Image (cartoon, helix red, strand yellow):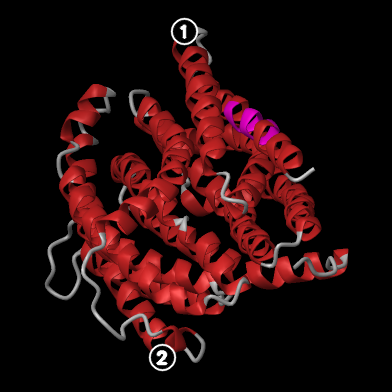
C-alpha cells in the first residue's frame, strides 16, 4: 500500500545522512591510493609510473567485482523496506560463495598480466616494477571481495558508519605498512612498487577481518544472524545473483576500464607524462568519491522507496539526489581551478611533470559535472534494478565513444596525452545524458 510521499527536505537530509559516511569511506579508500602515489613518487618517476600502470590494471579487475556485488545494497534495502529481514542472511551467505569463486579466479588472472604491458608498449624500465606491484596486491582480491560483501550488507540496511570506520582503519594501516615494505624497514628488503602491492594486500586482509567483527557484533546487523549457520552453495541462487550483478559489473568495468586503458595508452608516452597523468587522475579520483558516495546513498533511498511501493518517493529520491550531486560538483570544479598548483606540489617537484599535470587538471575540471550526473543517475537506476540499461549506456559511452575518441585524438590527431583526456570528457558526457534521461523516463 502506497504511503504519503516524503517532503523535499526529508529526501535531501536522508540522502546526506546516509551518504556522508560513505563519502568519507570512499575518500579514505582513494586516500590510500594518494598515499601510494606520493610515496612511490618519492622513489622516482619510474616507481610512480609502475604504481600508476599496475594500479590501473588492478582497478579494472577489482571494480568488476565491486560492480557485481553492487547488486547487494538494492536487494537488501528493498528487503529492509518491506520488513523481510529473515531473507537477508541466506542471501548474503550465497553472495559469500560468489565472493570465494571471484576471489580465486581474479587472483589467478591478475598473476598472468605480463603480456598486457607489452601489448600497450609500456616503457620497458617500468614493466618489471608494475608486474611486481600486481603480483603483490593480487593476494588482496579474495579478502577484498568478502570485505565488500559485508560492507554492502551494512549499506543496504542503511548502516553506513562502520564502512567509514573500517576504511579509516585501512588508511591508518596503509601508511606504516607502505613505509616498511617499500623502503625496507625492520629488516625487510626495500621492495619499491612491489612492496606497495604487498602492503595494500595486507591492509585488505585487516579490513575484511574488521568488517567480519562488525557483522557479528553490530546491534542491528547481528540480529540478521549471518554467521548463525553454514549454507551449502545454492547454484541457482548464486546464478540469479550473478545475473543481477553482472550488468553492474560490466558497467563498472566499462567505466573504470576506460580510465585504465587510457592510463595504459599513456604508458607508451614518456615516463614524465605517465607520472603527470597519474597525478591528475589520482586527484580527480579523490574528488569523484563525493558523487560516488552520494550515488550509493541514492541507490539505498530509491531501493527503500521501491520496498515501500511509493512511486513519488522513488522518483524524488533519485532526482533530488542528482540535484545534490550537481552542487557538490560545482565545488569540485572550484577546488581544481583555485587549488591545482598546490595539489600537484604535494606529489612532485619535477618541473616537467608539474607542467603536464597542471594542464591535465583543467580537463578534469571540465568533466566534473558530467561525471557527477552520470554516477548519480546510475545510482538511481540501480535502486529500481534497471541494471541492463546502465551496462548498455556505459559500454556505448565509455568504449564506443570515449575510448575511440581518446585513441584517435592522442595518436591520430596528434594531441598527445591531452587527447586522451578529451576522450574521457566525451564518454562521461554521453553517459550522463543517457542515464539521467532513462531515469526520468522510467519514473515519469
Query: From the viewer's perspective, is the residue at label 2 or at label 1 nearer?
Result: 2
Give the residue drawn at x 12%, y 73%. 187
Quadrant of the frame with the C terminus: top right
Give the residue drawn at x 54%, y 20%. 401
In this figure, which residue is indicated by the disc labeled 1? 412
Q: Is residue 280 above or below residue 192?
A: above
> Where's residue 176, x and y in %?
32, 73
- Looking at the rendered structure, which numbered label has been put on residue 217? 2
Give the residue drawn at x 68%, y 50%. 339
Q: Is residue 441 above or below residue 379?
A: above
Q: Is residue 37 visible?
A: no
Q: Residues within 10 Å of mark 2 (few under 14, many from 20)?
A: few
Asked if the magenta segment contains residue 432, the reply would be yes
> Where's residue 4, x and y in %?
85, 69
Residue span colored magenta: 427-433
Give the residue drawn at x 30%, y 62%. 200
* Distance (Cα) linking label 2 and label 1: 57 Å
Quadrant of the frame with the N terminus: bottom right
> Where's residue 421, x and y in %?
55, 28
Amino acid at each position: 500500500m502506497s504511503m504519503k510521499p516524503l517532503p523535499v527536505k526529508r529526501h535531501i537530509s536522508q540522502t546526506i545522512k546516509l551518504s556522508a559516511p560513505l563519502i568519507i569511506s570512499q575518500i579514505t579508500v582513494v586516500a590510500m591510493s594518494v598515499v601510494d602515489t606520493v610515496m612511490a613518487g618519492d622513489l622516482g618517476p619510474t616507481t610512480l609510473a609502475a604504481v600508476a600502470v599496475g594500479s590501473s590494471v588492478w582497478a579494472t579487475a577489482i571494480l568488476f567485482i565491486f560492480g557485481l556485488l553492487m547488486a547487494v545494497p538494492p536487494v537488501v534495502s528493498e528487503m529492509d523496506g518491506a520488513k523481510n529481514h529473515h531473507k537477508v542472511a541466506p542471501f548474503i551467505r550465497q553472495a559469500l560463495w560468489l565472493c570465494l569463486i571471484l576471489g580465486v579466479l581474479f587472483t589467478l588472472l591478475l598473476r598472468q598480466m605480463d603480456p598486457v604491458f607489452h601489448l600497450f608498449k609500456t616503457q620497458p624500465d617500468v614493466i618489471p616494477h608494475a608486474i611486481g606491484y600486481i603480483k603483490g596486491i593480487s593476494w588482496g582480491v579474495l579478502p577484498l571481495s568478502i570485505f565488500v560483501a559485508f560492507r554492502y550488507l551494512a549499506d543496504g540496511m542503511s548502516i553506513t558508519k562502520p564502512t567509514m570506520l573500517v576504511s579509516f582503519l585501512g588508511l591508518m594501516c596503509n601508511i606504516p605498512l607502505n613505509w616498511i615494505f617499500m623502503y625496507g624497514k625492520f629488516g625487510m628488503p626495500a621492495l619499491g612498487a612491489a612492496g606497495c602491492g604487498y602492503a595494500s594486500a595486507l591492509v585488505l586482509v585487516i579490513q575484511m577481518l574488521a568488517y567480519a567483527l562488525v557483522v557479528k557484533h553490530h546491534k542491528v546487523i547481528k540480529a540478521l544472524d549471518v554467521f548463525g549457520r553454514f549454507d551449502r552453495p545454492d547454484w541457482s541462487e548464486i546464478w540469479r545473483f550473478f545475473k543481477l550483478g553482472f550488468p553492474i559489473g560490466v558497467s563498472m568495468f566499462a567505466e573504470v576500464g576506460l580510465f585504465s586503458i587510457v592510463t595504459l595508452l599513456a604508458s607508451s608516452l614518456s615516463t614524465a607524462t605517465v607520472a603527470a597523468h597519474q597525478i591528475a587522475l589520482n586527484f580527480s579520483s579523490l574528488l569523484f568519491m563525493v558523487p560516488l558516495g552520494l550515488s550509493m546513498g541514492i541507490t539505498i533511498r530509491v531501493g527503500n522507496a521501491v520496498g515501500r511501493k511509493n512511486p513519488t518517493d522513488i522518483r524524488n529520491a533519485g532526482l533530488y539526489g542528482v540535484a545534490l550531486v550537481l552542487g557538490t560538483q560545482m565545488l569540485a570544479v572550484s577546488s581544481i581551478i583555485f587549488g591545482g598548483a598546490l595539489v600537484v606540489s604535494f606529489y612532485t617537484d619535477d618541473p616537467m611533470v608539474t607542467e603536464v599535470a597542471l594542464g591535465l587538471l583543467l580537463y578534469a575540471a571540465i568533466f566534473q559535472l558530467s561525471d557527477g550526473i552520470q554516477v548519480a543517475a546510475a545510482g538511481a537506476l540501480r535502486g529500481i534494478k534497471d541494471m541492463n540499461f546502465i551496462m548498455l549506456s556505459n559500454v556505448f559511452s565509455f568504449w564506443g565513444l570515449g575510448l575511440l575518441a581518446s585513441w584517435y585524438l592522442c595518436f591520430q590527431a596528434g594531441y598527445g596525452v591531452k587527447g586522451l583526456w578529451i576522450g574521457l570528457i566525451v564518454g562521461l558526457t554521453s553517459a550522463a545524458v543517457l542515464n539521467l534521461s532513462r531515469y526520468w523516463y522510467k519514473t515519469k
